[in-house]
Image: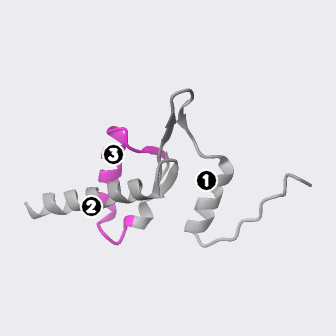
Amino acid sequence: MLKITIIQSLNNQIESTNKRKGRGKIIFTKYFSLIGTAFTVRQIFSRLCKNGMLLRLASGTYLYPKTSKLLGIVYPSVEEVMKQIAKRESLELYLPNPML
């Protein structure tokens, strides 16, 4: 019974974080490593993908998708993904200025 309660609590925390951040945001499982085991967090993210709430972009990297009636799922740009990964890894990212 306690295990089910912990999993439900983790699931609720992940869902509320996604909703707070808003659609179109990239979420990393690494952010949830302090609130549950890696296995449990992966299991919850997998379940959220099966339910259609999240899309898996890469290992440990998920998208809370933004949708458009015209286009369907709107994916973030490659630049946005790179910025989020750099932020997660505490790296500086230098992108060329397209105006030059």
Magenta-span inclusion, residue 76: no
Q: Amino acid at mark 3?
A: Leu
At a point 20% along the width and 57% down the height, the residue shown is: 8
- Quick one: 88 or 22, which is closer to the camera? 22
Locate residue 100, reporting x and y percent: 92, 55
**CA–CA distance in space, label 1 to label 2:** 25 Å
- Quick one: 92 or 72, which is closer to the camera? 72
The residue at the far top in this view is 70
Q: Earlier in the sequence, mark 1 or mark 2?
A: 2
At a point 37% along the width and 65% down the height, the residue shown is: 32
State the residue position of label 2.
Answer: 10
Q: Is residue 27 visible?
A: yes
Packing grade of label 3 (10 A; few <14, some 14-19, many >=20) is some
Locate residue 18, reporting x and y percent: 40, 55
At a point 27% along the width and 56% down the height, the residue shown is: 11
Q: Which mark is residue 81?
A: 1
Horizontal side of 81 relative to 64 (left or right) equals: right
Circle 3 sits in a helix, a strand or a loop, which is it? helix
State the residue position of label 3.
Answer: 48
Packing grade of label 1 (10 A; few <14, some 14-19, many >=20) is some
Q: Amino acid at mark 2?
A: Leu
**CA–CA distance in space, label 2 to label 3:** 12 Å
Q: Is residue 60 visible?
A: no
Locate residue 74, reporting x and y percent: 56, 38
Horizontal side of 90 relative to 59 (left or right) equals: right
Region in magenta: 32-56
- Quick one: 13 or 46, which is closer to the camera? 13
Locate residue 31, reporting x and y percent: 43, 66
